[in-house]
Amino acid sequence: MSLSRTIARPLLASIFLVGPISTLRNSSGAAKKAEPVTDPLVRFLQRAGVPITHDPEKLVKINAGVQLAAGLCLATGRLPRLSAAVLATSLVPTTVAAHDFWNETDPEVRKQQQIQLAKNVSLLGGLLIAAGDTDGKPGVAWLAKHAVSDVRRDLGHAAHTAKLESKVVALEADRGTAAVGATVGTALLAAGKHAKEVAQEKGPVVAAAAREHAGVLAASATAAAQEARAEAAPVIEDLRKEARKKAKRARKQAAPMIKDLRKDAQKRAKKARKHAKKQAPAIAAAARDQAAAARAQAMAVGELAKAKLV
């Protein structure tokens, strides 16, 4: 805990140590002023199903006891955020009941009550700041926001990896289909060349037969290519499904690792802060010793210079 918080928290809690004691000593007088506020509040809570007493004096004592306990916790640094939130909550009905300047007819009393109301509003602001003070540590909202960002980034990386794997699988499958087509095309070219040679040598009849044979080969090659693509399609789809499953498993396996790394980083940061806090007095003492030694050396040099001048 920093020095400013060590001093500020007892100062902020001091009014909640003095005020509740005075209220407990004179609970009947405080109950009369609180009754216009407690009656509608009790009716509202009872409609909501909350069991609560009608006696305003008991309610005033309960409120004073809560403020006294929370004030002690805040002053001693025990659960400072929770105690500040409790004090802020209890201060609202206390302020409305004790400083209702709008019901005062005397101008002087009305002005004093307005000033007291403004003071309590200022206290409420300080308590709200103390309730949100994390003492330099990351708050729950900050941790949640960064955890969501980390998860989104990891999911984005995993989705991008899965998409790349799917593209690689598709390219490999297309390359296989293209290889089948290239082989069939080479065969067709060879057949056509042979048919041309035979036609030139054997005459028009043989050439016609060769062209017919080449047409049959072309049709067969086309059918074979279509059949190869049809057979490759389910394989490609299976490979894509497998890639998606692998990406999903990778995300699931990475999630606990990411969580453990984040916890480990927080523990290391906490240890580093503790170590720095422990080493700070030793470093300061060493710096003071070095400064004292430097001053002594400087004085000695000065005395020596004076002696030489004399």
Image: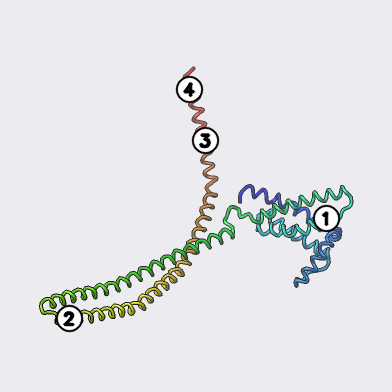
Q: Which of the two residues, 225 or 191, is positioned nearer the viewer here?
A: 191
Residue type at numbered disc 4: Ala
Residue type at numbered disc 1: Asp
Residue type at numbered disc 2: Ala
Residue denoted by label 1: 100
Residue type at numbered disc 3: Ala
Please give left or right for residue 61 compared with residue 209 in the image. right
Above or below, comparing residue 256 to residue 33 in the picture = below
Q: Earlier in the sequence, mark 2 or mark 3?
A: 2
Mark toward the viewer: 3 or 1: 1
Q: Which of the two residues, 110 or 259, is positioned nearer the viewer here?
A: 110
Q: Position of residue 155 (x, y in %)?
A: 47, 65
Q: Earlier in the sequence, mark 2 or mark 4?
A: 2
Residue denoted by label 3: 291
- Residue 124 found in image quarter: bottom right
- Residue 40 found in image quarter: bottom right
Residue denoted by label 4: 305
Q: Secondary structure at mark 4?
A: helix
Q: Earlier in the sequence, mark 2 or mark 1?
A: 1
Question: How dense is the environment of label 2, judged by Cα within 10 Å: few (below 14), some, or many (20 and up)?
Answer: some
Q: Earlier in the sequence, mark 3 or mark 1?
A: 1
Looking at the image, the residue that sits furthest to the front is 204
Q: Secondary structure at mark 1?
A: loop
Question: How dense is the environment of label 1, judged by Cα within 10 Å: few (below 14), some, or many (20 and up)?
Answer: some
Task: Give the residue drawn at x 77%, y 69%.
Answer: 45
Q: Position of residue 299 (x, y in %)?
A: 51, 28
Q: Earlier in the sequence, mark 4 or mark 3?
A: 3
Q: State the mark number for residue 208.
A: 2
